[in-house]
Amino acid sequence: MTMTEELTFWTHEQKCQKAVEALGSNGFTARYCPTPQEAADYIIAEAGDAVTVGFGGSMSIAGLEIEALLRSQGKEILNHSNPAFSLDEKLDIMRRQLTCDLFLSGCNALTLSGELVNIDGVGNRVAAMIFGPRKVIIVAGRNKLVDGSVQDAIMRVKNWATPPNAKRLNYNTPCSRTGFCSNCNSPERICRATTVIDRKPRLTDLHVLVVNADLGF
Ligand code: SF4
């Protein structure tokens, strides 16, 4: 690492640690991971006796490259992201994610006060984060941290997460063309369900990994 990289890493580390501390105060099981590999190792260890593992369509989770390993361990992978699936097949997998043993997701924004902010088009991902799966692990890269309010976090999602996601998924929205949110009313608008998880949901074993690396959008 160059000195610039070291100091940048250290600065991010302070913010990640602050978020982890706040998440702990809010009742979550929270862990600081200096590298994506440590997040991957944590998930593999926590997957333990899980038979079914749901993937919420997250680029952060995809970046950890753990799906093949979990599959090789004999776990049933519930991932609806395969473009070859029909709508019915996708819906079936999304519904099964709601009751899987372990659900894995990224997070669109995480405040330094320990609030998880997400925006969905369908709602399956945010629903599974809150209740249903036996265990939920949410991975937030340092690029998801917001030193501000929930409203600031929502703006982070609309400015930085949704436009590239809309473009990635080929949605016909203004943001997928311009890179800016215009609070559209497009039929393909993907901002339809905004959730703020500000304390651990009472009956959900919810873990949050804050990683000192840029993951997803
Ligand atoms: S409201 Fe519309 S334009 Fe704004 S981020 Fe969502 S989909 Fe894009």
Image (spheres, rainbow, N blue to C red):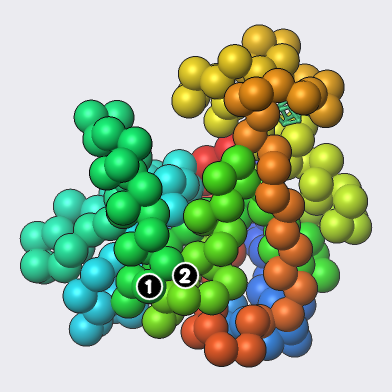
- Amino acid type of the residue that numbered disc 2 sits on in the rendered structure: Ile
| Quarter assignment of residue 134 | bottom left
Q: Which of pointers 2 and 1 lies earlier in the amino acid sequence?
A: 1
Q: Is residue 129 left or right of residue 62?
A: right
- Give the structural element (helix, strand or loop) at label 1: loop
| Quarter assignment of residue 116 | bottom right
- According to the picture, the residue beneath numbered tag 2 turns out to be 137
Q: Is residue 105 left or right of residue 97?
A: right
Q: Quadrant where the C terminus lies?
A: top right
In which of the image's four quarters is ligand 1 placed?
Answer: top right
Q: Is residue 197 left or right of residue 211?
A: right
The numbered dot on residue 117 is: none
Residue 182 image point, x, y percent:
83, 22
- Amino acid type of the residue that numbered disc 1 sits on in the rendered structure: Thr
Q: Nearer the viewer, residue 36 or 139?
A: 139
Q: Nearer the viewer, residue 65 or 174?
A: 174
- According to the picture, the residue beneath numbered tag 1 turns out to be 99
Q: In this rendering, does residue 163 appear at all?
A: no
Alpha carbon distance from label 2 to label 1: 14 Å
Q: Is residue 5 left or right of residue 113?
A: left
Q: In this rendering, does residue 77 appear at all?
A: yes
